[in-house]
Amino acid sequence: MKKILVTGANGQLGRCIKDAAPDFPEFEFIFVSKEELDIENETSLKDFFSKNSFSHCINTAAYTNVEKAESEPESAFRINAEAVKSLAETCKENDVVLLHVSTDYVFDGKKGLPYLETDTTNPINVYGASKLKGEEYIQQTCDKYFIFRTSWLYSQYGHNFLKTILKYAEENKQLTITTEQTGTPTNANDLAKTLLQVIEQDSGNYGVYHYSNGGETTWFGFAEEILRQIGKLKEAKLAKTNHYRTFAARPKYSVLDNTKAFNKLNFKNIGWQESLQSVLKR
Ligand SMILES: NC(=O)c1ccc[n+]([C@@H]2O[C@H](COP(=O)([O-])OP(=O)(O)OC[C@H]3O[C@@H](n4cnc5c(N)ncnc54)[C@H](OP(=O)(O)O)[C@@H]3O)[C@@H](O)[C@H]2O)c1
């Protein structure tokens, strides 16, 4: 039986994996929160792996505050790079397949076309640089790994763009949203299911993959669609801006090309608007 360790289990993606788990009764799961397994603590990591045996580890643990990372680069690199290195080494030592999640922010956004896995990376913020370093450590350490770069994750859980817009709409507050970046909102529930399907398939096609929902939009377009789907677009106080100031620079265009994942892992592409509907119906 496949036994799957899920780290960072109280985060957004971790919770979506927990929700998807009953659809995979053939797997045994161990979900661990940061309190139960801190991936920065190499000793407890090694100890945990020696006391339990797994076939796969899905690492959803990460430092994800893109803005804060600019002033806390040490923390971002400690979690997204150094801890990932220890985790990769531990997986290698225990012959565990590592499934890791990375980001569209490893790219600089200057390509103007959907990014392929083979495109040159060039992060323009600390978070992206720390995630890229984590990817590099995995590639240097493991043979059996999947790295899934995804984008603009949202769901019913945690702090994310969808939840912010819903809250503002509820309070009828003014929303000023940027049109400066183009990307693809991705439902974390779809990613969760996909990760488990990859384990189910057992293809052995290890490597780096791009995974997002289908299509592309701006943050403004995403906000507009959320408001449209909840029937509040007309009454909402929604305005565009093309110079929203942030600490962290963000790629202007970070759409991910999913072709490799379609071909090698049989991914299905769900359009981002359709997938949004399924989260709003929950
Ligand atoms: N969210 C996005 O838009 C987005 C986009 C592209 C890629 N990604 C990637 O997708 C993955 C999942 O993101 P998410 O949205 O689920 O993030 P999230 O909600 O912030 O979850 C991350 C979880 O990791 C935990 N964590 C932090 N440090 C840890 C440590 N040392 N040991 C164990 N757990 C630790 C966090 O706990 P605390 O909250 O207590 O610190 C949190 O529960 C991440 O790799 C992220 O980089 C996210």
Image (cartoon, rainbow, N blue to C red):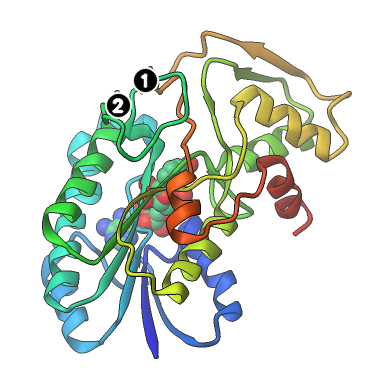
Quadrant location, the N terminus: bottom left
Q: Position of residue 166 (x, y in %)?
A: 72, 39
Name above or below for residue 211 compared with residue 224. below
Write the residue at 24% across / 75% down: 96
Write the residue at 14% across / 75% down: 46
Quadrant location, the C terminus: bottom right
Residue at mark 2: 125
Give 197 or 239, whichever is nearer the viewer: 197
Pointer 1 and pointer 2: residues touching (CB < 8 Å)?
yes
Relative side of 54 to 154, left or right:
left
Write the residue at 59% across / 16% down: 179
Q: Position of residue 165 (x, y in %)?
A: 68, 35
Which amino acid, by three-letter code, is at mark 1?
Ala
Ligand 1 within 8 Å of disc 2? The answer is no
- Identify the residue at the far front of this view: 263
Write the residue at 23% across / 50% down: 79
Crowd around label 2: few <14 · some 14–19 · many ≥20 (10 Å): many
Element type at mark 1: loop
Residue at mark 1: 249
Residue 4 numbered mark, or none: none
Ligand 1 within 8 Å of disc 1? The answer is no
Figure quadrant of residue 93: bottom left
Give 8 or 123, whichever is nearer the viewer: 123
Q: Position of residue 217 (x, y in %)?
A: 62, 27
Which amino acid, by three-letter code, is at mark 2?
Asn
Figure quadrant of residue 118: top left
